[in-house]
Image (tube, rainbow, N blue to C red):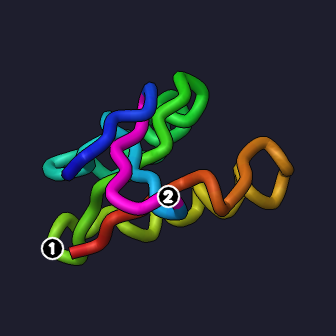
Amino acid sequence: MLIVFANFLSQLPTLQMPTLGLGCWQSSQGEVGQAVQWALEAGVRLIDTAFVYMNEKEIGDVLKKEIKSGEENQSHILVIFK
């Protein structure tokens, strides 16, 4: 049974998954970082990536910078790796 809480799906009271996310497949080097930045600014909290996309480092650099600066809380961002 899935329960929808505003912008999250939840199967357990302690587990919430954002209903919208940013897919990074075929995102170009040098552009994916800006896309992640804009997504975070827009309130997106799910980032989908994979090793074969070859853009994980740029995504990680943006997430690290945002978390380190205090702009984002690591526990509020879900990153899916495949």
In the rendered image, the vertical position of residue 9 relative to residue 14, given as above or below? above
Looking at the rendered structure, the kind of residue marked 2 is Pro
Q: Position of residue 64 (x, y in %)?
A: 66, 63
What residue does disc 2 label? 13
Q: The C terminus appears in which quarter of the rendering?
A: bottom left
Q: Position of residue 31 (x, y in %)?
A: 37, 40
Query: Based on the displayed image, in which of its 4 quarters is residue 41 positioned?
Result: top right
Residue furthest to the right: 70
Assign a secondary structure to mark 1.
helix
Q: Residue at x 19, y 65 (%)?
A: 53
Looking at the rendered structure, the kind of residue marked 1 is Val
Query: Based on the displayed image, in which of its 4 quarters is residue 18 positioned?
Result: top left
Disc 2/disc 1 C-alpha distance (Å):
33 Å
Relative side of 80 to 13, left or right:
left
Q: Position of residue 60 (x, y in %)?
A: 52, 65
In the rendered image, the vertical position of residue 42 relative to residue 60, given as above or below? above
Q: Residue at x 73, y 53 (%)?
A: 73
Q: Check if residue 24 falls in the magenta segment.
A: no
Residues drawn in magenta: 7-13
Assign a secondary structure to mark 2.
loop
Q: Residue at x 74, y 56 (%)?
A: 67
What residue does disc 1 label? 52
